[in-house]
Image: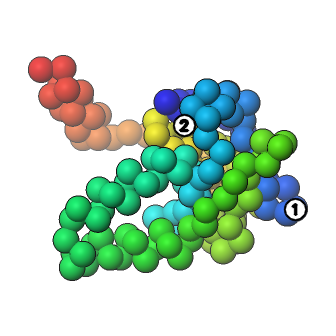
Amino acid sequence: MFRGNHPAKVDEKGRLKLPAAFKQLLDAANVTQFYVTSENGKNAQIWPLPEWEKREEQLDESSSLNAAVKKYQYLTSYYGQQVEIDSQSRIVLPQILRTAAKLDAEVTVFGMRTYLEVHNREFFEQNVLATELTPDEYKEVDAILSRKQS
């Protein structure tokens, strides 16, 4: 569903205007509710609520005693908040997440198929773009793609 990246800004009230290309896809799917969260506090994940609910169901099917699942649930609940898009195509990013991920001005919004990921643009460019894929990482990706084609 979501692909590519779009620069954006978070305003002083913590609102992110969803890029038009992503908004069109959401309108076509009639999505107005989202779960905004993070697994690590370094970026925000914006999940259309139906997609987040599928994820919750998958986790519920695993053992409730699973420590990794419990930790994941704690983290995504700590940073998470259910939000609704406003009439100007904006959603509010939770304050605790905005502070942790430094999502207070220039950001980049990535399409990650079923959800959107929001990064502080300066941090992303300095830390992620500054590193290239290693030969081993290329091999790992190639192996995954080769399995899918078989």
Secondary structure under the numbered disc 1 in the rendered image = loop
Residue shown at 27% from the left, 34% from the top = 141
Q: Quadrant of residue 61?
A: bottom left
Q: Nearer the viewer, residue 6 or 131?
A: 6
Residue 31 x, y percent position in the rendering: 61, 40
Q: In the image, 31: left or right of 70? A: right
Residue shown at 79% from the left, 61% from the top = 14
Please indicate, yes or no, whether residue 33 appears anywhere in the rendered image: yes
Determine crowd level at label 2: few under 14, some 14-19, many 20+ residues with C-alpha closer than 10 A.
Answer: some
Colour mapping used in the image: rainbow
Label 2 belongs to which residue? 111
Relative vertical location of residue 14 with respect to residue 22 in this rendering, above or below: below
Measured in 3D between alpha carbons, the distance from the residue under mark 1 to the one under mark 2, in whole angstroms, is 24 Å
Q: Amino acid at mark 2?
A: Gly
How many numbered marks have been drawn onto this rendered protein structure?
2
Q: Nearer the viewer, residue 77 or 44?
A: 77
The disc, 1 or 2, on the residue closer to the chain's N-terminal end is: 1
Q: Quadrant of residue 41?
A: bottom right
Label 1 belongs to which residue? 12
Residue 23 x, y percent position in the rendering: 68, 34
* Residue furthest out toward the top: 149
Residue 139 x, y percent position in the rendering: 22, 34
Please indicate, yes or no, whether residue 126 appears anywhere in the rendered image: no
Q: Amino acid at mark 1?
A: Glu
Q: Quadrant of the C terminus?
A: top left
Relative vertical location of residue 21 with respect to residue 47 in this rendering, above or below: above
Residue shown at 74% from the left, 59% from the top = 92
Secondary structure under the numbered disc 2 in the rendered image = strand
* Residue furthest out toward the front: 30
